[in-house]
Amino acid sequence: MRDTVVIGDIHGCGEELQAMFDRLQTWARKSRIVLIGDLLTKGPRPDLVVEEILARQRAGWQIDLVCGNHEPRALAALRRAGPDGRTSELPPRLAEMVDILADADLLEDAQEILRRAMRTPFLRGRNPIWTAVHAGVDPALGFKRTTQRMRMTIKSAQGEDDWWWKYDGKDGLLIVGHKPLSRPLILRRPDGRAVVAAIDTGCVYGGFLTAYRIGADRLLMIPSKQRRQFNFKRRTSRRPTDSAWQVASVVPARKLLR
Ligand SMILES: [Mn+2]
């Protein structure tokens, strides 16, 4: 059966996405690809992100896009900029994104990609039952009762427990991004099955671009080419003693790259 590969927050890191797609040709050949949101903002190469998505689709890849919290604001910026890419009224970082896309003549393609992502608040699949959603769920409410806004934005403050430690597992495997961590985090049930995969590893902050292959239960990490923006090693998620979930042993990134 075809496997599904979910890729964490790209944030305009086009070169790393290109490297990831190249690796996927051998690591997960003919898999379905899911991009988990926050595609174009913040990073230096939103143009290459758009081009890579379009080029791989033309080559026959199935690439599905899930909406992140940055998709609505990126689309709003592109709409305000109009067909000529006017950026005078935009905040600097969004203006830069629009300028880069305009220079590459990709304003319309970028809008179309963002509209597509926004039509997909989350994606579901089977074997095992999984949901790919940008940020997560409110563990007290469960997936169904968590608002879509919260599914795209939930994030604990520094020092607070992350939501995933309190998730009851009833909605199956949740694959999420949104909160940058120094390493991808796989939480497992006592029987070893994955219950949460948190795969935003801060590519735009100098970390990694991470992919999780669901059926095979494997990770692939591409090192970032971006400047380290903060002490990344401290971006961890501490396990509260009362959590039902086990943490998968941390595998050095170098090994994961093979
Ligand atoms: Mn996000």
Image (cartoon, rainbow, N blue to C red):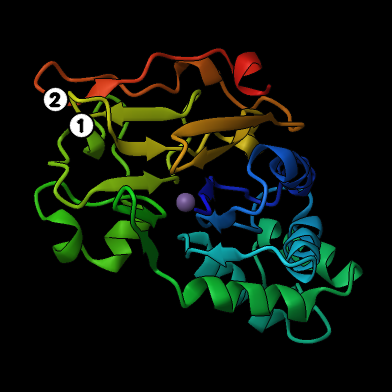
Residue 38 seen by the camera: no
> In the orientation shown, which residue stands out farthest toward the front?
1
Residue ID at (26%, 34%):
162
Q: Amino acid at mark 2?
A: Ser
- Mark 1 / mark 2, whichever is N-terminal: 1
Q: Give the Cα distance between marks 1 and 2.
A: 5 Å
Residue that mark 2 sits on: 243
The secondary structure type at the circle numbered 1 is helix
Image position, residue 109 (x, y; %): 75, 77
Task: Name above or below for residue 9 compared with residue 182.
Answer: below
- Residue 155 x/y as whole percent: 32, 43
The picture quadrant where one finds residue 234 is top left
Q: Residues within 10 Å of mark 2 (few under 14, many from 20)?
A: few
The residue lying toward the viewer, choosing from 161 and 218, is 218
User: Could you tell me which residue is drawn at 82 percent across and 73 percent down?
Assistant: 106
Compared with 206, 10 (above or below) is: below
Number of other residues with Cα within 10 Å of mark 1, as a class: few under 14, some 14 to 19, many 20 or more: many
Task: Where is residue 10? Give x, y as percent.
Answer: 62, 48
User: x and y percent of residue 176 in the render?
Assistant: 40, 46
Q: Is residue 42 above or below residue 69?
A: above
Q: Nearer the viewer, residue 83 or 219?
A: 219
Q: Determine the secondary structure under disc 2.
A: loop
The residue sitting at 58% across, 23% down in the picture is 230
Q: Which is more toward the observer, 72 or 16?
A: 16
Q: Which mark is residue 105?
A: none
Q: Is residue 232 left or right of residue 234?
A: right
Q: Are marks 1 and 2 in contact (CB under 8 Å)?
A: yes
Snapshot quadrant of residue 158:
top left
| Callout count | 2
Amino acid identity at mark 1 = Trp
Residue 165 tag number: 1
